[in-house]
Amino acid sequence: MRTHEGGELRVDVLVTGGAGYIGSAVVLALADAGHRPIVLDDLSTGRRELVAGRDCYVGDVADRSLVRRILRRHPGIEVAIHCAARVVVPESVARPAAYYRTNVVGTLDLVETLADNGVDRVVFSSSASIYAPGADLSVDESSPWAPASPYARTKAMVETVLGDLAAAGDLRALSLRYFNPIGADPLLRTGPQLPEPSAVLGCIVRAHRSRTPFTITGTDYPTPDGTGLRDYVHVWDLARAHVRAVEDFDRVLGDERHLALNLGTGRGTTVRELVSAFERVTGQRLRVVEAPRRPGDQAGAATRTDLAERLLGWRAEHDVTAGIAHTLQWFDRREHVLPGIGLAS
């Protein structure tokens, strides 16, 4: 691995999906830590403004010739962080072929090209949606899988593919299973960018700003108040975890070829509790209506965080309140960073 003057670690990192919500936060955290991120993004949802001034290539991760060209131009790349994916659960139910093609086939094309060109370290953006929650609505890395949507199944499939490729000696992979990202870069350099958010906090903000009711989808789950429960982890905490994964990749994996770590706070928050926290941050009441569950939705779960703390030396530092506050601050600023995106809705 490369070093700065003075012996500090410096790593060249390919970040796919690096102009997206999580990817752009990862890019910033890497750069803040002294590393050099090189971005590959098709800009289908990402924004070029979020990677301005960086080495950024526009294209598909499945474009093997493009990936080879990037690696030739940046021979110092030693690890790839693969964030690029389709991620909207209801859309995956309506358009499963697109999700399998992008998330599974595209990932296989990418990692094969990387391995064939000497980049055998891969950090994969996986998802806690693969799990079957336990009776206490908590999971750890050994919990059984029961992915309930095509999106979740693509993540489980990719982890299986990575495990098989790793066992064959083609690469080494660290799968980071995200729980539910919220928030924005605390310095407000990046944050949620979709004009029509599907994640619950974005929908709450849209309802608040448009003075329309927020719809709780599903009130009959086996949770304390009947609404879905999630482990809301701040996007900047996720970004910090990726920096740790890059810097300590070999040590974290040890003798393993493929390893998975959960990234969450260890605390579950129901939708009603999230609404209450939002009201505390804003000082305003939010009108709420109820509706049936959406296709592919689950009761949810929180993670037990022991393994990430022990192996990665990481734990979440921001709570739900900070995630809400940073989201609102980002939406106040977003139009200046991303012109033409309109109201945070």
Image (spheres, helix red, strand yellow):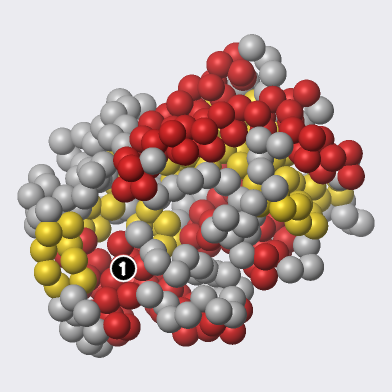
Relative vertical location of residue 124 with respect to residue 105 in this rendering, above or below: below
Report the quarter where the N terminus lies: top right
Picture quadrant of residue 93: top left
| Secondary structure of the residue carrying numbered label 1 | helix
| Residue at 7%, 50% in the rendered image | 220
Front residue (pair 69, 332): 69
Q: At which x and y percent is residue 337?
A: 61, 79
Res. 209 in view? yes
Q: Residue sitting at 66 percent across and 43 percent down?
A: 60
Residue 158 falls left or right of residue 179: right
- Residue 101 lies left or right of residue 208; in this view the side is right
- Compared with 249, 333 (above or below) is below
* Residue 306 visible somewhere in the drawing: no
Please count the marks in the image. 1
Residue at 42 percent across and 57 percent down: it is 181
Q: Amino acid at mark 1?
A: Cys
As drawn, the residue found furthest toward the right would be 5
Q: Residue furthest top?
A: 168
The residue lying toward the viewer, choosing from 59 and 300, is 59
Q: Examine the rendered structure and indicate whether residue 271 appears above or below residue 138.
A: below
Residue 201 percent across, percent down from the top left: 33, 66
Q: Residue at x 25, y 73 (%)?
A: 277
Quadrant containing the C terminus is bottom left
The quadrant holding residue 210 is: bottom left
Residue corresponding to mark 1: 203
* Percent coordinates x, y for residue 331 in the rendering: 46, 79
Specify few, some or many for label 1: CA neighbours under 10 Å numbering under 14, 14-19, or 20 or more.
some
